[in-house]
Image (tube, grey):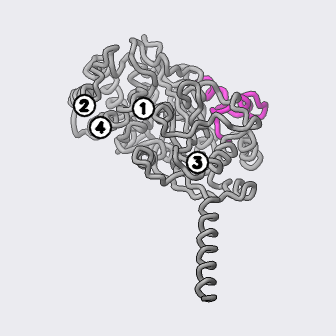
Amino acid sequence: MYLKNALRAATALALVSTAAAQAETITIATVNNGDMIRMQGYTDTFTEQTGIAVEWVTLEENVLRQRVTTDITTKGGQFDIMTIGMYETPIWGANGWLVPLDDLSEEYDVGDILPAMAGGLSHDGTLYAAPFYGESSMIMYRTDLMEAAGMEMPDAPTWQFIREAAAAMTDRDADINGICLRGKAGWGEGGAFINTMANSFGARVFDEDWNAQLDSEEWSNTLNFFIDMMSESGPTGYATNGFNENLSLFNQGKCGMWIDATVAASFVTGDDSTVADHVSFALAPNAEGVEKRANWLWAWALAIPAGTQQEANAKQFIEWATSKDYIELVAANEGWANVPPGARTSLYETPEYQEVAFAQMTLDSILAADPNDPTVDPVPYVGIQFAAIPEWAGFWTEVSQEFSAAYAGQQSAEEALEKAQAITNEAMEAAGYR
């Protein structure tokens, strides 16, 4: 009897110990971008301060979106924190799928979050995700190649100038492409880039009655211009290049220009870049005669799925990872140029950060992006590189696949747009928009 009781006691103690260990470990799904990888390197600091261990699930952008969407819609419960953005957050918050971040500490200073970021990560005035970093898009370019081409980059260039400069900087024998842009399928990869570019050509995805507009002249101009420019001056296989692939090409000295997320600035000017001393920045382009520029608005943010058993611990991590103190931690160890940008007003008021070469251009790009007025002609949606409707991720992923097939030479731009028009209208009809 004594032995049985002892075994029972030991088993119970083991179960309690296991539960306690589980209670002090949170699991975070995140994207394999540089700032997120950097954050993982500081996790031990958080654990030492709080006793809360962190397990990371780090995924490529398209895979991350699929995994977290599946998990939250099926109540899978795999993650205590998810890395999501301005598209998912308001929709998931409205559905009750996220824990409101309406009780963060006074020291955290929610009011310091840039209004553009807080607005995009809220629903009905309630914050549902905290921005780890915020971004727009801008031009990163090689000053040495621009000078050698006998050209000078304007602060606010047109697409026509960019195409001319790309051709002048291209040197196939030296493996230098005048321009590197996203062609990779995925609504948040190449799909985000081409939709933002389309805005700057005067295009829109829908008219005010939710009729698809992908058969318009403006969309034809956008897609044909993109394909022609990339054929002239882009890298081989650009149809499969996304953010990380283009970052690698640029840092290897194989791109004259790269138009992409402002957050990339710290990496193209950092230690891993072979061209760091020859990089400058300009606003994203507009087409001649069109005022809208091709700059998006985005934040990679941390959110807590409703139903997690680790809500308190998850909030502790979010407060730590998106705080002013975290920014200062990175600055102290790696310099101000490497702190996560675009999330807090106070960062842009910091004298040391104001001296960073790309700080002002990043802020100017963010402030120039207006998700409430993204297009030349009126539209019934909010969002720049996406329309903030639940159906977007599904059908625009399909559309982006058709575009990537055109980039790869598997079909013409006209064929891709015809299919995109059909895909989009079918999705709208099925969802009851029309």
Please say whether residue 210 is visible from this viewpoint. yes
CB-based contact (under 8 Å), mark 2 and mark 4: yes
Q: Secondary structure at mark 3?
A: helix
Residue placed at 29% from the left, 28% from the top? 431
N-term mark: 4 or 1: 1
- Note whether 63 is above or below 129 in the view shown: below
Residue 112 position by quadrant: top right
**Mark 3 or mark 2, which is nearer the start of the sequence?**
3
Say the numbered circle drawn on residue 218. none
The quarter of the image holding the C terminus is: top left
CA–CA distance between discs 1 and 2? 19 Å
Name which residue lies at 50% across and 31% down.
Answer: 90
User: Of helix, strand and loop, which one carries label 4?
Assistant: helix
Neighbourhood count class around disc 1 (C-alpha, 10 Å): few under 14, some 14–19, many 20 upward: many
**Is residue 109 left or right of 276 when viewed as pictured?**
right
Q: Which residue is mark 4?
A: 398
* Residue closer to the observer: 145 or 271: 271
Task: Identify the residue position indicated by label 3 in the image.
Answer: 36
SS state under label 1: helix
Q: CA distance from mark 2 to mark 3?
A: 34 Å
Q: Earlier in the sequence, mark 1 or mark 3?
A: 3
Q: Which residues are magenta?
A: 339-365
Q: Which residue is mark 1?
A: 193
Q: Amino acid at mark 1?
A: Phe
Q: Nearer the viewer, mark 1 or mark 2?
A: 2
Label 2 belongs to which residue?
A: 423
The amino acid at mark 4 is Glu
Place of residue 62 in the rendered image (x, y in percent of width and height, measured from the top left): 41, 45
Amino acid on which disc 2 is placed: Ile
Is residue 341 one of those drawn in magenta?
A: yes
Q: Few, some or many C-alpha atoms within 10 Å of disc 4 (few <14, some 14-19, many ≥20)?
A: many
Residue type at tag 3: Met
